[in-house]
Image (spheres, coloured by chain):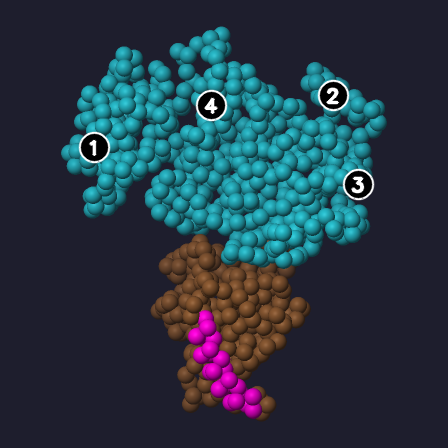
Chain colours: A brown, B cyan
Amino acid sequence: MMNDEDTEATYLIAHARKVFLLPMAMILCLMISSVAIGQPKEMVRITGGSYVPLYGNSDSNLVKVRDFYMDTHPVTHTEFIEFLYDHPKWRKSKVIALYADDNYLAQFETDLTLKKRENPNAPVTNVSWFAAKAYCASLGKRLPSVDEWEYAAMADDKIIDARKSESYNRRILSWYETPTTYRNAVGDGRGNYWGLHDMHGLVWEWTSDYNSVLISGESRGDVEGRTELFCGGAAVGATDLMNYAAFMRYAFRGSLKSNYTIRNLGFRCAVDADHVMTNTTP
Amino acid sequence: MTLSMWKPRQKFEWAFENFNKVVMPRIFARNEFPDLNRKELMNRSKLNSFPKKACTILTALAMGVSLWSCETNTNGKEVDSPETIETDGLIMAELTAPPHVPEPVGDRPAKKVLVHMEIIEEEGEMVGGVSYVYWTFGGTVPGSFIRTRVGDEVEFHLMNHPDNKLPHNIDLHAVNGPGGGAASSFVAPGYETAFTFKTLNPGLYVYHCATAPVGMHIANGMYGLILVEPPGGLPPVDREYYVMQGDFYTKGDFGEPGLQPFDMQKAVSEDADYVVFNGKVGALTGENALTARVGETVRLFVGNGGPNLVSSFHLIGEIFDRVYVDGGTTVNENVQTTLIPAGGAAMVEFKVNAPGEYHLVDHSVFRAFNKGALGVLNVSGEDQEGVFAGKIVEGIYLPEGGRIQEMPVDTARLIASRPSEVLSKDEMMEMGRNVYMQTCFACHQSDGQGIKSVFPPLAQSDYLNADVERAIDAVLHGLTGEIVVNGETYNSVMTAQTLTDREAANVLTYVYNSWGNNGTVVTEEMVKARR
């Protein structure tokens, strides 16, 4: 019911920005990141560090993450509609089949409006990896890598690495058991240590290299030989046996292809810290 | 493997249109079983394939000696190796929810069989007042029963519902091939995958999800049975049922109300809160009980999904005339209890000789009476005095011996349960019924009728209605020794029950207000006064 008004408003915003964006995009230099910062949507700086990801088995698997910025919440329907106004080729009637399968934006009534029961402030889902990537690129951003995403997501509201905390794991797991969370508005959850919202609890999120840590369809077979692959079954290589919440994220990513569109899968964007001028820290 | 969008309306057309174009050539192009040479397969087929009925009888008469005679079928032709059996036509598999099974294959030829299985993650009831998010094949735990025969070519479509959160797959133990289909069937939410296999070995097989973390997917209910019948089918029986055991691990202990999440730590420790048949407590009791008539032969397809526990499957009051050990070809006879491993199955057959209630249990018996592994087979018909005279009952197993057992009482739980809110009588009745079905039902039976001469009735019970304090005492402190109820003498043991004041009050109120009793309302204060 709010859709018409909302889209009207976003349309105006989008066009106002277009005047600004287009020349910027043509210039294409480091300055481009200031466009990202100029967005109404907040980003926060994640201080880099190193950690042993789930698929690692010792300190030799330590992953280094450099400083980067990340959106505070997943991209919403409203924000994505704004993008669709400026980029018609990503509308559902126009999108190339190679880049998105038949369910692309299935919750949309038309190219630019949502179906009635959908929530404009809920994360946009049913988007392919290609579409997510294009959205971020349109703002001078990119998708976060798996390592970055996992690094940022292992924080609770107090500490950077809460993976051993029972309440942290329980909260994630209770999400797995709650139906239709994809219709909830973003920003309702408590922010984590970095000020990131909804890393867990609403939807899964695309990452730039979602398939680099592979769980093959036959997860029990992943024990043998290919030790770099995470083993879901016997899990002999996993550092933290109890972090089974993360098992499922890696398993989920393993089931994806880049043109897939899934009701429970959204995204948020990131940008390298050295692409952001320090004096404009958001 | 083929991947396509999950589109219920299109899938049938797709399958039919593409069978010859896509699926068939693929089946024949691949050498799917390189490690089995042809001779081995021939030998296997001779031993494993069930011959025609006449042959079965011969075998039974002269086990071992006459096995060679089964190498030929009724036409006198050599039985082909299952791999080379040609299929004749295409059918949609009939899938059934437990405890039902599809029609027997009978003497139909091997066919191409299309199976469409949908994966659904949904909340369901574990026991009255307790819910759990189940992950299911076909919307039930265990998943839909699949029935095939040797030589069938199964085209298996696995659809992962778009609202599901997780990817899944399926490993069918009936498959000869890597992962039992797991790698070929890994499918994201909102997608469908298809793969094919040929059924080579007759028997009863478990299928289950094998996606990381495998144990959790199984613990949440992702298992079921697929039957591969021999050519000509299994010998006909009067009734067939589908029963599958599973163990569940929840944050709260048995019976703790509300939505209970999965508990990985308990699962790793193999410390089950629930051990149940067909996915929940009471799936096979009360109005869900299995039924048969005196003189009929019953076949149970019994599986065990695990994930951890091995079942000592037993039917109280019956002896299995025949057990297809481990669901394979060996038939054992006159068996009291048969072991069903996690990820394994067995077929048991028995003729029911006398009317009454028979109890299916895991004879690791605390699971039956404290964790839910209890089902009922109701046999109707005329009394058979010659078989069973009724005075000596092989009744409920009574592990406690001749004295009252004290059980530890959790004081924190007692305090927490003290009245904070006033319940209406309806609420008391409902909660009382839940307690009854968890705690009292096994002995006093679903309608309070008890078991004659072993467990006294609660229905229209003069003993009960005469003295409410005595009834409260029995629940709180147990009761032993001789009592007379409705003119019948009982001498048995009731243990003290670990119930909170509220639970005790509710269940007593339920009993007093059911089955023609006097309608007393028992309050928590009355219970507390007697504790």
**3 or 2: tag closer to the N-terminus:** 3
User: Do marks 4 and 2 share a subunit?
Assistant: yes
Question: Which is more N-terminal, label 4 or label 3?
Answer: 3
Residue occupied by mark 1: B522
Q: In terms of depth relative to the viewer, which is nearer, A2 or B74?
A: A2
Residue receiving disc 2: B55
Question: Residue B429 lies in what quarter of the image?
Answer: top left
Dot 4: element? strand
**Residue at 64% of width from left, 23% of height from top?**
B236
Give the x, y percent position of residue A268.
50, 72
| Magenta part of the chain | A3-24
Mark 4 or 2, closer to the camera: 4
Write down the chain letter for disc 2: B
Q: Secondary structure at mark 2?
A: helix
Closer to the camera in the image, B268 or B1: B1
Q: Is residue A181 visible?
A: yes
- The mark nearer the N terminus, 4 or 1, is 4
Q: Position of residue B127 (x, y in %)?
A: 39, 39
Viewer-nearest of discs 2 and 1: 1
Residue at left 63%, top 43%? B172
Residue A205 shown left or right of residue B207 in the figure: left
Label 3 belongs to which residue?
B37
Q: Residues within 10 Å of mark 4 (few under 14, many from 20)?
A: some
Q: Quadrant of the N terminus of chain B?
A: bottom right
Q: Residue at x 34, y 36 (%)?
A: B434
Residue A183, compared with residue B365, is above or below; it is below
Left or right, B465 with reference to B71: left
Mark 2 vs 1: CB contact within 8 A: no
